Amino acid sequence: MTERSTTETRPAHWYTSALVCLPARAVALVLAGGKGSRLRTAADPELQGTPKVLVPIDTPAGRTPMLGHVLTELAAVGFRRIAVLTSTDPASGADTVETYALTHSARHVELTIHREDHPLGTAGAAYAALAHLPDTPAAVVLPADTLFPAALLPSAVAAHNARSAAVTWTVTTAPGRSAQNAGRLFLDPGSEHIVHALEGVDATLPPDSRQGLQQATSTGAVILTPTPFQALFEEYAQRLAQPAEADLYRQFMPWAISQGHRVGAYDIRTPAPDLGTPDRLAAFGRTA
């Protein structure tokens, strides 16, 4: 008679998984200082008289300002710290924007306002805000006027942290129709980092330089590891003839790539339309 072994051949501890979630104290940096100059070219009085990020859009929860939609989405995916970055430019309506943010954030969210003293650019504004946000393991920069699928952010942050990168640019290889600046980024064959960035540059990449590279489009969301990002930004700023605005997408990250610093890429493979023009607002933000 053969006795049955009491030893488990597949111990229970073999069945494990990793929970993909945001790091504790991760912060979202919401870009909310835009003037909305392009939206104001429309004949619509609402677009002419409303701060850009407070223009209402159609969402599953009903019509709500762009900023309100972003704050709700970020809280829903686990952000407990949100920083709203605003501008001193009167055209941005900072007072109204800040009041809205402070009165419409979720109760469990620690929301802070960071108004630049003078125009800093998106990279400069992120750098300045992080100086007031200690103990931050990861930061996500997100424009308030972009319909980014926030549910993908925890996975994007996890991928960023696994690479130990200072900066990861979230991109899409499926930008959909009417995407702004489509195909201006080129990824390495493994789609893990950006090789060329032509955002805001009137130039094309020669065909022989594209071999093996994946063409992609910016989604607007950028993930930062604060300490190395701050060091890299300081290196960038020291090379300027004098302090000036520093755009995250058109200046800082292309510079970092050109200097041999690795900028990671995370492909969300779905559209993330921005709503910065009347046509795109009508196409993607006014769907009801």
Image: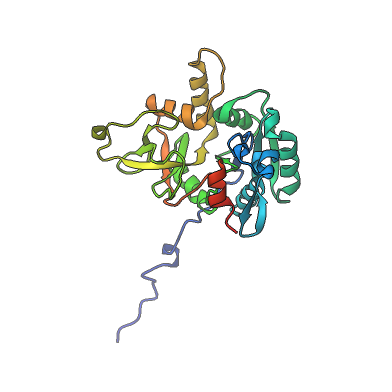
- Image quarter of residue 16: bottom left
Q: Where the C terminus falls, by quadrant? A: bottom right
Q: Position of residue 56 (x, y in %)?
A: 66, 49
Q: Position of residue 122 (x, y in %)?
A: 56, 31
Q: Where the N terminus falls, by quadrant? A: bottom left
Who's the residue at 35% across and 39% down the image?
187
Seen in the image, is 86 located left or right of residue 139? Answer: right
Whether 17 is drawn above or below 56: the answer is below
Give the residue furthest to the top: 241
Q: Nearer the viewer, residue 75 or 10?
A: 75
Whether 88 is drawn above or below 267: the answer is above
Q: Is residue 146 visible?
A: no
Who's the residue at 57% across and 43% down the image?
278
Q: Nearer the viewer, residue 274 or 251?
A: 274
Give the residue furthest to the bottom: 1
Q: Nearer the viewer, residue 261 or 62?
A: 62
Color style of the picture: rainbow
Q: Nearer the viewer, residue 284 or 75?
A: 284
Who's the residue at 69% across and 41% down the image?
50
- Image quarter of residue 25: top right
Q: Position of residue 93 (x, y in %)?
A: 71, 35
Q: Position of residue 87 (x, y in %)?
A: 66, 30
Who's the residue at 51% across and 12% down the image?
241
Q: Is residue 227 visible?
A: yes
